[in-house]
Image (cartoon, rainbow, N blue to C red):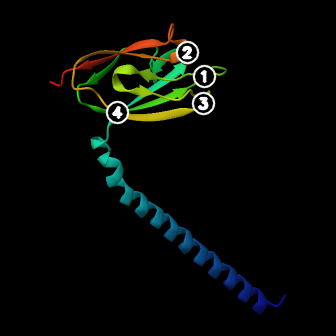
Amino acid sequence: MSEWKWLRRSCAARLIGGVRQVFTLGLAMALVAGLLALLPLTASTETDPREIVIVAQDMAFYLSGGSEPNPRIRLTAGEEVRFNFSNLDYGFKHNLVIDGLGIETAYLEADESTIISVRAPKQVGHRPYICFPHRAMMRGMIEVVAKD
Ligand SMILES: [Cu+2]
């Protein structure tokens, strides 16, 4: 290859490389700008209902990260909450029933989950929660406490 051809080819390669770099940088900047634009949305989650993550495992209910089976779950009267219920028990179907709150989920297979948004009753007191087919073992208490 002549020196001239080589020079031209090398320049072209450099030019393409440069364009590619600018393009990548632009893409990265657009991505960052997009994420920054989303920030106010994630910041507004303060006003979203409190999420209570409940998992069914080893034939009991657990709060996410908790070790106490069938724990007492405290709600504030009138509070809006979002139950995120999932089944991690392989080979068993579970559901979540909270009579006093009008909640009855479908039977979940292992690795399935469901989200139920509900407003806690204004009246303080206790409402049992169960898994219907395993209610002898899987039962706990929702405690609605007064707002202070
Ligand atoms: Cu069950």
Dot 1 and dot 2 residues touching (CB under 8 Å):
yes
The amino acid sitting under disc 2 is Pro
Q: Earlier in the sequence, mark 1 or mark 3?
A: 1
Dot 4 and dot 3 residues touching (CB under 8 Å):
no
Instruction: Name the residue carrying label 2.
Output: 133
* Label 2 beta carbon less than 8 Å to ligand 1: yes
Q: Earlier in the sequence, mark 1 or mark 2?
A: 1
Q: Residue furthest left?
A: 148
Q: What element does badge 2 sit on?
A: helix
Q: Nearer the viewer, residue 7 or 96?
A: 96
Using a 10 Å C-alpha cutoff, classify the residue at mark 1 as few (fewer than 14 neighbours), some (14 to 19) or many (20 or more): some
Q: Quadrant of residue 52?
A: top left
Q: Earlier in the sequence, mark 2 or mark 4?
A: 4
**Of labels 1 and 2, the one closer to you:** 2
The amino acid sitting under disc 1 is Lys
Q: Which mark is residue 118?
A: 4
Seen at 53% across and 33% down, the residue is 113
Q: What element does badge 3 sit on?
A: loop
**Of labels 4 and 3, the one closer to you:** 4
Q: Is residue 48 above or below residue 123?
A: below
The amino acid sitting under disc 4 is Val
On the image, the x and y values in percent for residue 21 come to: 57, 72
Q: Which mark is residue 111?
A: 3
